[in-house]
Image (cartoon, helix red, strand yellow):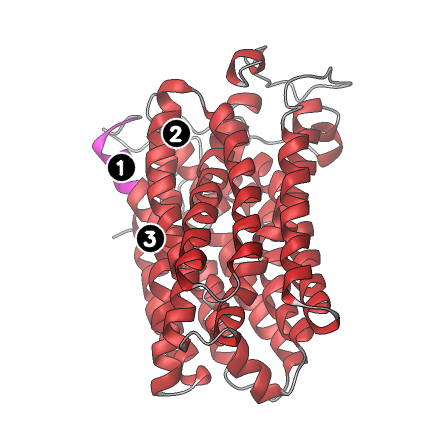
Amino acid sequence: MDLEPNHPNESPTGDSVDSGRSWVVAVAAAASMFAVFGVAYSFGAFFRAMSDDFGSSSSATALVFSLTISFSFLAGLWTGRWADRVGPRPVVLAGAASLVVGLVATTLVPNIWLGYLTYGGGVGFAVACGYVPMVACVGGWFDKRRASALGVAVAGIGAGTLIASPVAAWLIDLTSWRTTYLIFAAVAGSVMVCVAVVAKAGPAAVPSPTPKSIRQLMANWDFTILYASTVLIAMGLFVPFVFLADYAESQGVARVAAAGLVGLIGGASVVSRLGLGSLADRIGAIKLYVGSFFLMAAGHLIWLAAGGSYPILVLYTIVLGIGYGGFIALSPEVVAQRFGLDGLGGTIGTLYTAAGIGSLAGPPFAGFLIDGFSYNVAIGFSAVTAALAAAILTLLGRGKSTGSTGHNIPAKSGSDLGA
């Protein structure tokens, strides 16, 4: 099958929006996100083994994950624009290569500092290639069912988290963390290559020869609110992906069961992404998006009250997972509604630099709080940042822009927000 990239202006012959071919692309996007996020979000299962092997502190080890996720979101600005220009296929192939090289190199490093480069750079770039470009690709294949299709696509993130984290814990117990990463490299890299075979720009994709700058976007009130709330929510959101398994083990939970808690966040988010994506097609994405932020804040409060109770920890993962799933599933649709399909990959990538900032700051600071104070202080930090993010998001659509992207969807915000 031809692997030459399609230019976004080209529409595949015989295919149209909301067609059967469109759903093939949505499933391929889900597979892409399953691979890259399955690797990245299983880091909590590796956390203690890597920390012990390298003799590093909680904060230093958590920085591996933070650099990875932060770089993936920051690089998404570039990979989104790259895919806008040349189509998603070469971008996904580059991600597959980066994932394999990064994981293999990580198995060879003698210290945590080199791990920042090999894992943070290799896996981070792979996530940037497998996420934003494929989300934007799905957006170009749908019109009436776009929110549902995006829900299917990003459900791959939750499925990857659900499966990879407990599998990683099992493989680490059976072999070692280094061997486990070699296995992940082979499996996830192969999945990414298969995704590239079917990845093509959609008929509704709109080329953007002059991408909107972050300054242009920030001149718009709605984008500023989305950006600020994303920074804050990301600061606390990624803390459990690093520390929840270790926290549970410190409370006497077995390793695989502890890692399974992170998997449950992914499992709950799958249900949320599919359900809320479909619901958004009928009642509006923005109301559900705001509600997801409040749900994540409530989830962190449940963790704060859980102590060593495994059932309450499970409840926490479900509540957080539903809110997290809504955040990820609905943010591309909210962006598409507010700013249009013109250069969608670049606009989404710009917004996700906010998540890059939050994810870089949050887990290492939480590790500092854990080492210096206690887990409860770190969990409280997550709850506070999530509550602030939800409060800021209620201001969406309530201000006047000082500038324009030129592609805003006019005055839907009042009804969407229930104002």
Residue 163 position (above or below residue 416): below
The crowding category of the residue bearing disc 1, from other C-alpha atoms within 10 Å (few below 14, some 14 to 19, many at least 20), is some
Residue 55 position (above or below residue 389): below
| Observer-nearest of 229 and 192 | 229
The amino acid sitting under disc 2 is Ala
Residue 122 position (above or below residue 298): below
SS under mark 2: helix
Determine the residue located farthest toward the right in the rendered image.
402
Q: Which residues are magenta?
A: 18-25
Q: CA distance from mark 3 to mark 1?
A: 12 Å
SS under mark 3: helix
Earlier-in-chain disc, 2 versus 3:
3
Residue at image position (66%, 32%) is 391
Q: Which residue is mark 1?
A: 23
Q: Which residue is mark 2?
A: 147
Residue 18 position (above or below residue 75): above
The amino acid sitting under disc 1 is Trp
Residue at image position (37%, 74%) is 256
The amino acid sitting under disc 3 is Ala
Main SS of the magenta part reads: helix
Q: Which residue is mark 3?
A: 31
Q: Quadrant of the C terminus?
A: top right
Dot in front, 1 or 2: 2
Residue 253 percent location from the top left of the image:
43, 74
| Observer-nearest of 70 and 389 | 389
The crowding category of the residue bearing disc 2, from other C-alpha atoms within 10 Å (few below 14, some 14 to 19, many at least 20), is many
Residue 113 percent location from the top left of the image:
68, 79
Residue 80 percent location from the top left of the image:
54, 43
Instruction: Please say whether residue 255 is visible from this viewpoint.
Output: yes
Earlier-in-chain disc, 3 versus 1:
1
Q: Is residue 119 left or right of residue 358?
A: left
